[in-house]
Amino acid sequence: MEGEWVLMVTAKAPSNISVIKYWGKRNEALILAVNESISITLDLDHLCATTTVAVSPKFEKDRLWLNGKEMSLSSDRYQNTLREIRSRGDNFEDDEKGIKIMKEDWMRLHFHIASHNNFPTGTGLASSAAGFACLVFALAKLMNVKDDMSQLSTVARLGSGSACRSLHGGFVKWVLGKDEKKGKDSFAIQLEDEKHWEDLVILIAVVSSQQKEISSAKGAPLTVATSPFLHYRAKEVVPKRIVEMERAIQSRDFATFAKLTCADSNQFHATCLDTSPPLFYMNDTSHRIINCVEKLNRHEGVPQGAYTYDAGCNGFLFARDRKAAALLLQRLLYYFPPNPDTDLSSYILGDKSILKDAGLENINDVEKLPAPPEIQDEVPAQRFRGNISYFICTRPGPGPVMVSDQGQALLDPVTGFPK
Ligand code: DP6
């Protein structure tokens, strides 16, 4: 195949946060989990990956640029993902541009891939989930792949387990599957779409940390190899929790949702502690955030908030509704005021309208916040200034989307190299 043409597609894919945790694989190469998991897809406006993929007969090899920097594609995970998506490509024809690609050509043609995240890297939020979901979705569009989202999720899974859940919006379950040879039935399904539970508010506390965490890819196999508790959890605890969580989500039962979410996060971190050598992902600030939510819930009598932590120290909090989110934010800002000279609008990112609900217009309002009523007997109440870098307020969001505006493409349409 010859020619100077460049064909390209740009897409955005969301990040997701699990509420029943995936940790550990029964098959490392195929990325088949030891237990099922459930997640909520986060709004694209606040946390997403944008990826442009291009194909051209003039490209000499597959190349990848991540956040502007060229990265190697030589890992098994990239190679498996690319091989699998290539095998699903279909015929493509564009008479105007004089492009005709046959199914079998995809095996020989090379890709240029450029990707970036709309959230700062180095915060522990730069999960591989959005990135691999976006790569697979964009390539599927480029190659005219006819698979549905669940079938595509099995390809994203080869890049990173949690990525399979980012192919759907809303509330998503990654099913275990029985095909141990190929993993064809270990895919993500949508339980409910993003409009199902509109009251739910998600608040992410990005915790200041210099600590370099052990990646999930390295940590989880250690847990599988050394923690008896993980295997007990996978067999005896998670299957029941999955059923209960599905029911709680379906009926928007926040009290049960909160109980299961917090318990599952804590149990996942307990398996990390049960690993040899132990894995520590949460820090003192993470634990203080947990206390803050637990105290609020106890004080209110009915759960208003829930928390979950991935393999990192950032807290993902859920509030029952906007009123509960305002209560929670007031408390969090009381305990964790920003460093001096921080602008409130750079301390609360995403959906800033939550500030108004909490009665906070500027940084002076934060300084004047009264001690939460539930701790008034503890004198003096301690505040931990600067321990949280910032918050992101978000909500459940849709799955991947195509970006038609060429201005947002990350590759030049003529050269196929980063702009
Ligand atoms: C703690 O998907 O990052 O976030 O499959 O090895 O790439 P690999 O791991 P990854 O694991 C994420 C684990 C988690 C919990 C979860 O997302 O369910």
Image (cartoon, rainbow, N blue to C red):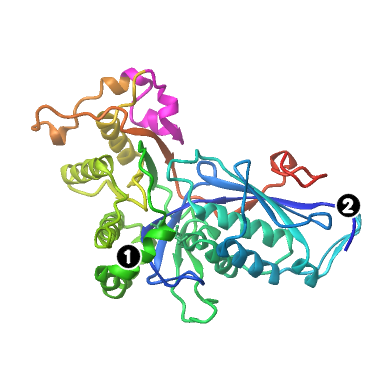
Check disc 2 and report the residue beneath it: 4
Q: Quadrant of the C terminus?
A: top right
Residue for badge 1: 223
Check disc 1 and give the amino acid type: Thr
Q: Find out whether the residues at labels 1 and 2 contact each other: C-beta distance under 8 Å.
A: no
Residue 323 to residue 226: above or below: above
Residue 197 in the figure: left or right of residue 291: right
Give x and y (percent) for residue 179.
50, 81
Q: Position of residue 413 (x, y in %)?
A: 79, 45
Q: Is residue 106 left or right of residue 271?
A: right
- Position of the N terminus, as image quadrant, is bottom right
Tag 2: amino acid: Glu
Q: Which image quadrant for residue 133?
A: bottom right
Q: Nearer the viewer, residue 157 or 374?
A: 157
Q: Which residues are magenta?
A: 341-364
Q: Nearer the viewer, residue 319 or 363?
A: 363
Residue 343 colored magenta? yes
Q: Residue at x 55, y 79 (%)?
A: 182
Q: Secondary structure at mark 1?
A: helix
State the image quarter where residue 202 is shown: top left
Of helix, strand and loop, which one carries label 2?
Answer: loop
- The answer to whether the beta carbon of the residue marked 2 is less than 8 Å from any atom of ligand 1 is no
* Residue drawn at 34 percent across, 23 percent down: 339
Is residue 264 inside the magenta stretch? no
The quarter of the rendering in which ligand 1 is drawn is bottom left
The CA distance from mark 1 to mark 2 is 50 Å
